[in-house]
Amino acid sequence: MTDLVRQEIDTAARRIIVKVGTRVLTRDDGMLDRDRIQNLAEQINTLLDQGRQIVLVSSGAVGAGISQLGLRERPKDLAHLQAVAAIGQTNLIEAYDQNFRRHGRHAAQILLTADDLKDRARYLNVRNTLLRLLEIGAVPIVNENDTVAIEELATTFGDNDRLAALMTNVVQAQLLVILSDVDGLYDGDPNDANSKIISTVGALDESIFALARDSKSGLSKGGMASKLQAARIATTAGESVVVAAGRRPNTLIDIAAGEVVGTLFLAQGKAISPFKRWIGFSAQPQGTLIVDSGAARAIRQQGSSLLAIGIVSTTGTYAKGDVVAIHDEDSRELARGLTNYSSSEIEKIKGLRSESIGEL
């Protein structure tokens, strides 16, 4: 069954980020499922033949390492996990490259850490490399650098959902597809036979995020919470997101054809500029400015620049040109921006009218 909204979105999506999770790429014993990688590569090749550009964000390095080393179970300690990931990463990229070469294409490995996207110069270098790879028809395969990214391996669900959303911003992809071991976002407990998949989400409000949390403990259930956070990043930037089952046959091809597959999260407004995407989602704020209600209202409703008279206080140490976060007096983040003044200067001019700043 097709959907007119989906058809419009998917037809316009010439550049797509595809994120595939570990559970999609591995068998029940934790080893790499090469048949699924072959099927995924064939689907991507079909989309490339349609004139689309694909960036693949792929987990699975640890699973590939387990297969390569013949281990019976996933290692528990961090150092062992990182060693297995280092071995598995070469095996994983080799599996992808072997399958893409059957179609006359090349896989290109991109290993990143968060610092690569926080720094503006490195961010632009990543972006330029990815765009050039897409121009020459290669398939960039992006993964967090598991051998040094400790947080990624210390948790059950790492940051590859978020990484995929950030990649959507880096290359300004029109669609992010997250392939998971679940069919989409359910309106209740996924284990309840009466729960149904929500076809379309218009706004990622608290009621949607509540569906990914246990009603008693308040903790997130499975990996859906991280997928919703990723969807928030991409949709806020003006792009759409689909979360769907990665083990379902021809999922990517059906999504690209406008079929009702998984859950579609609609873009929130027009696409924002590349520079604002970096400031809002990749850059790390070096400090915080707390503003009064008048300044908060001006920023929210008019998108005004922040004047010194509206600043109540500041935290952190930063220099002119650094990225800072702007919070209201209830500690809610309103915006981010580049500061014209250092933290020491802000302390001197906060609360003052603009005409007084030069004299001071």
Image (cartoon, grey):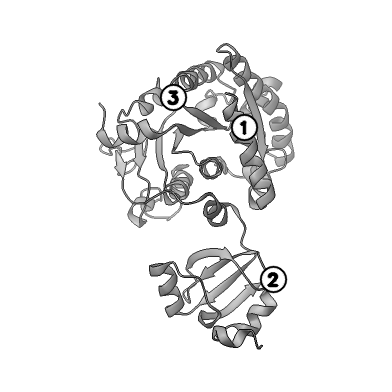
Q: Residue 163 vs residue 6: left or right?
A: right
Q: Secondary structure at mark 3?
A: loop
Which residue is the site of mark 3?
Answer: 247
Q: Secondary structure at mark 2?
A: loop
Using the numbered discs, state the Cα–Cα distance from disc 3 to disc 1 in whole angstroms.
Answer: 31 Å
Residue at horizontal 72%, vertical 38%?
147
* Residue type at the position of mark 2: Thr
Crowding at mark 3 (Cα within 10 Å: few <14, some 14-19, many 20+): some
Using the numbered discs, state the Cα–Cα distance from disc 2 to disc 1 in whole angstroms.
Answer: 37 Å
Crowding at mark 1 (Cα within 10 Å: few <14, some 14-19, many 20+): few
Which residue is the site of mark 2?
Answer: 317
Q: Is residue 308 visible?
A: yes
Quarter of the rendering occupied by the N terminus: top left
* Residue type at the position of mark 3: Arg
* Residue type at the position of mark 1: Arg
Residue 316: quarter of image: bottom right
Q: Which disc is residue 132 wearing?
A: 1
Looking at the rendered image, the disc whose residue lies closer to the viewer, 3 or 1, is 1
Residue 93, how many percent across, how many down?
65, 24
Residue nearest the viewer, comparing 5 with 341: 341
